[in-house]
Amino acid sequence: MDRFAWTSGLLELGETLVVQQRGVRLCDGEEKVKFDSGVLLLSTHRLIWRDQKNHECCMAIPLSQVVFIEEQAAGIGKSAKIVVHLHPASSNKEPGPFQSSKYSYIKLSFKEHGQIEFYRRLSEEMTQRRWENMRTGQTIKVNKNPQAGRLRAVGIVGIERKLEEKRKETDRNISEAFEDLSKLMEKAKEMVELSKSIASKIKEKQGDITEDETIRFKSYLLSMGIANPVTRETYGSGTHYHMQLAKQLAGILQTPLEERGGIMSLTEVYCLVNRARGLELLSPEDLVNACKMLESLKLPLRLRIFDSGVMVIELQSHNEEEMVASALETVSEKGSLTADEFAKLVGMSVLLAKERLLLAEKMGHLCRDDSVEGLRFYPNLFLTQN
Amino acid sequence: MHRRGVGAGAIAKKKLAEAKYKERGTVLAEDQLAQMSKQLDMFKTNLEEFASKHKQEIRKNPEFRVQFQDMCATIGVDPLASGKGFWSEMLGVGDFYYELGVQIIEVCLALKHRNGGLITLEELHQQVLKGRGKFAQDVSQDDLLRAIKKLKVLGNGFGIIPVGGTYLIQSVPAELNMDHTVILQLAEKKGYVTVSEIKSSLKWETERAKQVLEHLLKEGMAWLDTQAAGEPQYWLPALFTELYSQEITPEEAKEAIP
């Protein structure tokens, strides 16, 4: 943190703003500092941080001081970060918030997201090194001195020109983008045609194409996002990727499952896993395909699909039918329960509570009372008291 | 005399030819796979080039995203099928939509006690934007619809129901058939519907109308107002506008139902 120098925050002539993000906290290496909530600005020349509450508090580091940058994915309860490794401060550096630091890197913590974009832009600036080409002149001072009039005119005309340039560039970019997109799609179309012809060959040859080749083909389809026309019983739509994923999931979900009574809905799993990842998220299909392989890979979790279509992950050790017995007890104690009431009592999600009661009904232990007031379950006295 | 195709010799020859053809067939598939592998590598390079120039455009420009998605659909490619796909890895479209999926699930779960698992696309859009914060990337309604279509596979009953000029998003595994959908569409104009209205516009019998309305009541998607002037009105909380709705707790919601 000793590389930062106080600054007014005004951009200099020749310096342009690239991207900004609010809700950024600064860290000196591994240690937190009091600058916990600010707007982080990236210009062609510098990294500037301004406190959101106190705008006077504003500091910057020249991009030339940056050695390299890394991304740190978000974790549970932790925001995503960018780690910026810096050269040692030069001896003639302007004064800043810290005189010395034992770290040669800082961390930017993105409490309100925006790290993906910021990292990308920062990487771009680091590659292009525009600060080496553009000399910065005096700061544009407005309303400060008698010569301001002349300077101001230059400043504003300059800004207007820049905006016009930007508009034209945006238009050019969009039409170029569409053109490039069309060309790209032509090539993608060829890939689709090729995959169709291979798929039909596979269908013809039925037993003559090896397991290995089928898996290879499936992974090619996965990369291109082409739907798989040939499904094999052994792995379904799975590929090596999904196999690995299944094993990872078994590791990640063990504890959360235990904490939630051994069962979680697939949407819960989707949110949990993706929130933890922060980057390189799983698609819903990835998750489902991986879960379909859990049982065949003999992992300690399994996918279960209820009659209603609701999909859950259970621990192998979890036995829903046993849980039904205890559900029956709970319902009997209270006389009758709706899914909402049961959920609250047991501490489950309403979705899963309903599934358990429905299963109990299916097994004959509970009876339903379906009225406008809702769906209520009673112990099945027809069975027990006959 | 030449005889064609008969005799043990001919049969043996035919068998040999078949065997050779089969062998060649396997080789053919291998060849094609190798060809596909090479073409894939080339395509990946093309995509990388495209990404380096236009990744920004996709992330910042909702209209361009629509174009991109439509073109993919036309040629039979799903860029959102897997996080491991090229499109996702290089253009970053995956993360954008999958994260959006998480946000949609969370909003729907939070509001379920109020609307029974039905919400208009507009309200969902507003709530998601609120959750994302002021400086987050712009998200369009089209983006939401695409994310929701992907969520269907998770088995939680995500569905998209066209009503009026917009859509109702269902996020619970409740059975909603054509009859229910039609009534939702009828209710869209005023936020509520009555049995007489259903009978006059749809020409249904009372029994059919009542059955459908009762199902919606049971699912918590409709509320009954017995104090309305004339006949009881069936309101859909999903369609309440800012004017009529208030924040209520699940307990209050329960008490509101007779």
Image (spheres, coloured by chain):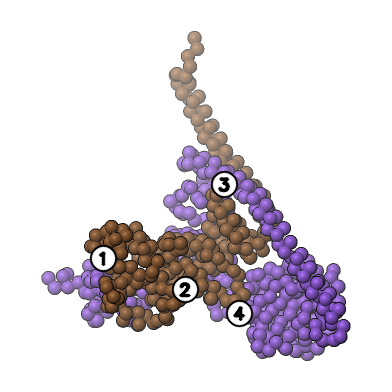
Chain colours: A purple, B brown
Is B233 located above or below residue B6 in the figure?
below
Q: Which residue is mark 3?
A: A192
Answer with mark 2 or mark 1, whichever residue precedes in sequence. Answer: 2
Q: Which residue is mark 4?
A: A111
Q: For the residue marked with disc 2, what is the amino acid?
A: Val
Q: For the residue marked with disc 3, what is the amino acid?
A: Val
Measure the alpha-carbon separation of dots 3 and 1.
50 Å
| Same subunit: marks 4 and 3 | yes
Q: Secondary structure at mark 4?
A: loop
| Same subunit: marks 2 and 3 | no
Measure the alpha-carbon separation of dots 4 and 1.
50 Å
Q: For the residue marked with disc 4, what is the amino acid?
A: Lys
Q: Could you tell me which chain the residue with mark 2 belongs to?
A: B
Q: Which residue is mark 1?
A: B210
- Farthest left residue in view: A386
Q: Going 70% across and 83% down the picture, which residue do you hit? A: A50
Category of crowding for the residue at label 1, using alpha-carbon neighbours closer than 10 angstroms: few (below 14), some (14–19), many (at least 20)? some
Marks 3 and 2: in contact by CB < 8 Å? no
Q: Secondary structure at mark 2?
A: helix
Category of crowding for the residue at label 4, using alpha-carbon neighbours closer than 10 angstroms: few (below 14), some (14–19), many (at least 20)? many
| Same subunit: marks 4 and 1 | no
Q: Which residue is mark 2?
A: B107
Residue A231 position within the rendered picture, expressed as x and y whole percent measured from the top left: 46, 49
Residue A138 position within the rendered picture, expressed as x and y whole percent measured from the top left: 85, 79
